[in-house]
Image: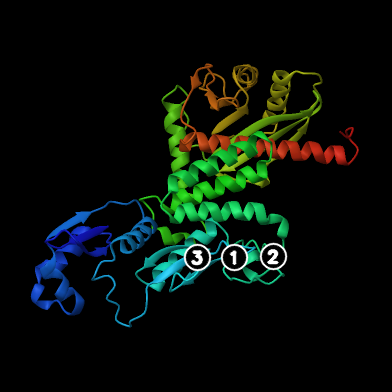
Amino acid sequence: MYVYHDKAGKVIYVGKAKQLKNRVSSYFQSPTRLTGKTALLVPQIATIEVYVVESELEALLLEARFIKKYNPKYNIMLKDGKAYVLIRVTKGETYPAVVTARKMDDKKSVYFGPFPSSTAVREVLRTLRRIFPFQSVLHHDRRPCLYHHLGLCPCVSAFPNTLPAYKKTISHLIKFLGGHTKQVVKDLEKERNVASKQEDFELAAKLQKQIDAIAYVTHPMHQAFEYETNPHLVDDLRTQEMEALQQVLNGHGVPIGLPKRIECYDISNFQSSYPVGSMTVLTNGTIDKSQYRKFKMHSTGPNDFGMHAEMMQRRLKHDEWPLPDLFVIDGGKGQVSAVREVIEQDPRFVGKPLPMIGLAKREETMVTPDLEEIHIPKSSPALQLVMRIRDEAHRFGITFHRKLRSKGFLPQQ
């Protein structure tokens, strides 16, 4: 982002560029070739102020805020005489909507902008709609629309019970458009952690996807608007997570390669009875349900350590299953010790470093085979990767347990 000031210090133009040096120098290298608005602008430039942002999306939003704040003379000189485009979020309607506008003529709405072009507005909204699905018409039909099937519109008028969740989504969107990206991420992380503690792992996974998407579109390595056309938009983020996890574990005596296949193990039971075990898999950092496995445990009583050991013994008997680059055990030092004894007896691991860790849920602490505790921030990509597969193991195990109860294999609650 760059801002031009005149001799009096007044902002006269706001712009953005990926290669700032090339953009700014182009104004001054051949001043005789400049025409129109630019020819009038350049002689008045006295100082240049620079703002470094991390993505194209943030540059667009900051540019809009500066245009609104300073009303620069050479930004508002539009050739067709039209007003700049605004993003309008309705709040007076029963079902909030996100639309475009040319005037701020509704006091009950929240406006963002003005944006320098309608193309910029469309890019912003297309990107954000994939993160924060919204209704894009003021009076939505009571039937689900095409965008609902694409995951872009909640169709609240057709599903009124989703209104509370939708209003929360709109609140996040407003904060994001207002430049409070970090606060939105913190809010989503809190919601995800609550959902995880309440064992609502489907919601936790959904919130994590939103967090990942925000990280993607605000990351300096990516073009924000690739998000709307790239069906594999988080592949590079997954690679970064795997590399981060590899680096953390290598630095704590767990010499693994890039963990392209990670297996996680969890025990689910009801009042210490009828336990079931679950094995979930991440392939290249992505959930791979085709590789999931479930176990009806033979052990009984409150013996979590023994059940983890039993599940690993049964898993290692399956030579046809590919070995993982990393085993993740849901639990702390006790569970890790029990499983370690099983793995180190397997001929494929005798005399070799064991590619395994535990994840103690209370503080989200990783535990190495040597029982060293690894404490890293919850925002760490490495920990996010391990937490994601752990939460998925919880979800899968609980779903299996409930399914058995519903079929009469286990007593109902």
Q: Residue furthest front?
A: 107
Q: Residue at x 12, y 77 (%)?
A: 33
Q: Secondary structure at mark 1?
A: loop
- State if disc 1 and disc 2 touch (CB < 8 Å): yes
Q: Secondary structure at mark 2?
A: loop
Type of residue at label 2?
A: Ser
Which residue is label 2 attached to? 157
Instruction: Indicate the quadrant where residue 295 lies.
Output: top right
Nearest the eye: 175 or 397: 175
Nearest the eye: 375 or 112: 112
Identify the mark nearer the N-term, 3 or 2.
3
Q: Provide residue 400's location: percent of width, then percent of height.
A: 77, 39
Type of residue at label 1?
A: Gln
Within 10 angstroms of label 1, few (less than 14), some, or many (20 or more) residues? many
Q: Nearer the viewer, mark 1 or mark 3?
A: 3
Q: Identify whether 407 is placed above or below 125.
A: above
Instruction: Identify the mark at residue 107; answer none if there is no mark.
Output: 3
Q: Nearer the viewer, mark 3 or mark 2?
A: 3
Q: Identify whether 400 is placed above or below 90.
A: above
Which residue is label 1 attached to? 135
Type of residue at label 3?
A: Lys
Within 10 angstroms of label 2, few (less than 14), some, or many (20 or more) residues? some
Quick one: quadrant of the C terminus? Answer: top right
Within 10 angstroms of label 3, few (less than 14), some, or many (20 or more) residues? few
Identify the mark nearer the N-term, 2 or 1.
1
Q: Identify whether 216 is placed above or below 34.
A: above
Instruction: Identify the mark at residue 281; answer none if there is no mark.
Output: none
Identify the mark nearer the N-term, 1 or 3.
3
Q: Secondary structure at mark 3?
A: loop
Q: Provide residue 213's location: percent of width, then percent of height.
A: 50, 51
Q: Provide residue 148's location: percent of width, then percent of height.
A: 64, 65
